[in-house]
Structures are given as C-alpha cells and as structure tokens.
Amino acid sequence: MKEINDTLGHQMGDQALKDAAHILRQTYRTADVIARMGGDEFAVLAMMSEKPETGPLARRLAEQVEEFNATHPRPYHLSLSMGMAAWPAGKLANLDELLSRADARMYTEKRTKKEHG
C-alpha cells in the first residue's frame, strides 16, 4: 500500500484497503473472523473441519483477487502474500504463536516472490 499512497495518494491507498477488506469479506464465511492487523496486513481466523487444510482457502482468496483485478478498473493492481498456520480441532492454540507462524510464512512468501520476479 505504501507504493499506492506514494504514487497515487492516500485517498487511493484508503480505497485499496477497502477493496482488500471487501474481497476478504466475500471470500470467507460470516463465521470467520477478519481483522486488519495494521498497515496493509489482514488476519483471518477461519474455523475448519477436523483436518485443517489451508490450500483451498489460499486458492480461493487468490482467485478472488485475480477476478477483482480483472473486473474492477482501478489505477492500481491488488496483490497478496499469504502466510497460513493451522492447528487441529480440539487442541488449544496460543494465538500469538499462531500469528507469529503465519507472519513468518508470509514474509518467506514475499521474499520468494522478490527473488523470483
């Protein structure tokens, strides 16, 4: 979002955040918790079945971002980097540890994207 703010202004940066929030609300269920963590980072707490599988959730979100970019003309292009962490149903998880794992995975993905273009 920094690039959008710097090149297009804060009003466009605010619109990009609203667009991202809209995509998240459309992608996930009403029972899932969506929170803006700060800046351009969002967290989604998605309740899953007994066997947590984050792959389908990640694909669905990526598809929604692609569809949004194709169907909503904007002077910017939304992109995403995801870090997902899961824990088995019925087991208590430390939320800070879960967020830390997801954050580390997101930065690994960002670094990989930069290295491979």
Image (tube, rainbow, N blue to C red):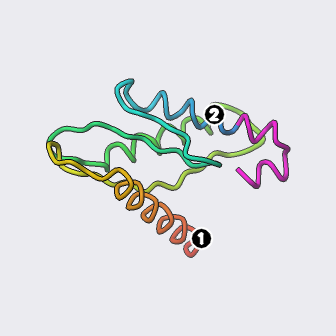
Q: Which mark is residue 27?
A: none
Label 1 vs 2, first from the N-terminus: 2
Q: Is residue 8 above or below residue 114?
A: above
The reply, left or right, for residue 37 in relation to residue 63 is right
Q: Which residues are magenta?
A: 1-15
Q: Does 8 lie within the magenta span?
A: yes
Q: Is residue 14 above or below residue 99?
A: above
Choose between 112 and 2: the one closer to the eye: 2
* Few, some or many residues within 10 Å of mark 2 (<14, 14–19, 20+): some
Which percent across, then down, holds residue 7?
85, 51
Which percent across, then down, holds residue 15?
72, 34
* Few, some or many residues within 10 Å of mark 1 (<14, 14–19, 20+): few
What element does badge 2 sit on?
A: helix
Q: Quadrant of residue 117?
A: bottom right
Which percent across, then down, holds residue 50?
14, 42
Going by the numbered disc 2, the residue's amino acid type is Asp
Q: Does 10 lie within the magenta span?
A: yes
Residue that label 2 marks: 19
Going by the numbered disc 1, the residue's amino acid type is Lys
Which percent across, then down, holds residue 44?
42, 41
Residue that label 1 marks: 114
The reply, left or right, for residue 110 in relation to residue 75 is left
